[in-house]
Amino acid sequence: MLHSPPVRLAEVTCGYTDKQMRGPEKTREILGTRACVSAEMATFEDESSTSQSPIDLFNSQGIDISPNKDRGVCKIVKRQGKEGERPMIGDKVHVHYTGRLLNGKKFDSSFDRKEPFVLNVGKGQVIKALDIGVCSMQKGEVCLLLCKPEYAYGNAGSPPKVPPNSTLLFEVELLNFRGEELTEDGGILRRIKVKGEGYNNPNEGATVHVHLEGRCGGRLFEARDITFVVGESEDMSVPLGVDRAMEKMQKGECCLLYLKPKYGYGKEGKPEYDIGPNAELLYEVTLKDFEKAKESWEMDLNEKLEKAVLVKQKGTQYFKSGRYYHAVIQYQRIVSWLEMECGVGKEQQQAIQALLLVAHLNLALCYLRLREYSQTVENCNKVMELDSENEKALYRRGEARLLRNEFTLALMDFRQVLQVNPSNRAARCRIAVCQRKIREHHERDKKIYANMFQRFAEHDAKVSRLKRKKDESGLVDQNNKSVKKP
């Protein structure tokens, strides 16, 4: 709908609707809140019904917000928003809007689709004027935008609703916005202050040159220029969250990173910075420059094998120091390099298999420590594709299944361990634990079902008693009716 050509208007925002409200003092639901729609929310018909044309209105009242100050995008604030921050590049924003031609004809509106329109602002997902306009707004603000063709659909227009070289009018309400989530768990939130150059990003193993400013609770605790290798930031005391964000940044970019404890200094905190356990951090990061590492396709097999040995050592170093997430990064690099390699000759094949086996085994152990049991099972399965009787893989898979309360599957794994190595005392102990857990589980089930059946029996007895009473009552009534008075 708001996208740049050649996308057709009707193809873009399907699924976002709401009723368009007109007139003073009406209300509507907006993202779970109630907002007053007063005379300030006058539609474009109201504006165009005055003696002033839209062009004259913006010439007299409009503010030029176009970057080049060419009056390509002019703005009139209809309702002030809440004082505070404005959206930054990449933020996820929720807006309501109505778009019209200069003659007042509506060509698009989120209100007609009963949900707000959601976009990542500044990413080219909508016409340039909307990116510029939304970034100028505060939460709750309602504004009018006059957009010249070069900031809208240009020479092509957007047939059939928007003719070529059309100047457009928009009414926009900014409902909400938040930063871009860089991880599935929402642990790293990015807000871009200055957009970077081009489309290249640092990759795993790249050397990056950055400026960091770290804050905790509003207090600046570090400001420094630093160089580190992506995936090895721990060596320079740079938080994991900053490391993980590098692969999303471009040269020259300046962004704010909001880090949950998992991606900051975790449970340990950072005493030298006076940061306690489980603290949330805010980092301002500027990527000054970077040199990419070789991609997998740029290396021959011998180079991959040599690098894999070094990376394995680095991963083991991180594991021993309790930096399990950093260790995972290293072991995953080995898998990405070698999982599709076959090798030439028996020696290379054995080397590939040995490194992959160690990488998956160590990944399984890391994920076990991190309590990510599904990943533990998955990596143990990968090991057993290479070695079906691998004692460590069977044991670690059993541990993960036991911790997931999959007692029967865990019992099978530990029994297989004893088949491979009858002297494994740890597996024997775990078998006893599994058997006890299974018995406890069965006892709980028996109690649950016993109580359930007892309740069913009591309910049936109660229904039966009520039915008998009803039948007896009916019989008495019938007898009374059959006895006639003399």
Image (tube, helix red, strand yellow):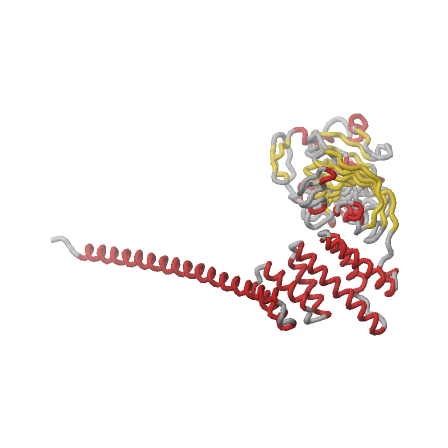
Give residue 468's position: percent from left, percent from top: 28, 59
Give residue 351's position: percent from left, percent from top: 81, 68
Give residue 202's position: percent from left, percent from top: 84, 50
Q: Is residue 12 above or below residue 436?
A: above
Q: Nearer the viewer, residue 355 or 207?
A: 355
Q: Is residue 241 above or below residue 375?
A: above
Q: Is residue 175 left or right of residue 345?
A: left
Q: Is residue 480 left or right of residue 139?
A: left
The image quadrant of residue 52 is top right
Q: Is residue 165 visible?
A: no
- Residue at point 76%, 40% (across, down): 283
- Residue at point 37%, 60% (across, down): 457
The image quadrant of residue 299 is bottom right
- Residue at point 75%, 55% (across, down): 327
Q: Nearer the viewer, residue 175 or 391?
A: 391
Q: Nearer the viewer, residue 84 or 311?
A: 311
Q: Nearer the viewer, residue 464 or 147?
A: 464
Give residue 43's position: percent from left, percent from top: 69, 33
- Residue at point 84%, 46% (across, down): 250
Q: Is residue 262 visible?
A: yes
The image quadrant of residue 99 is top right
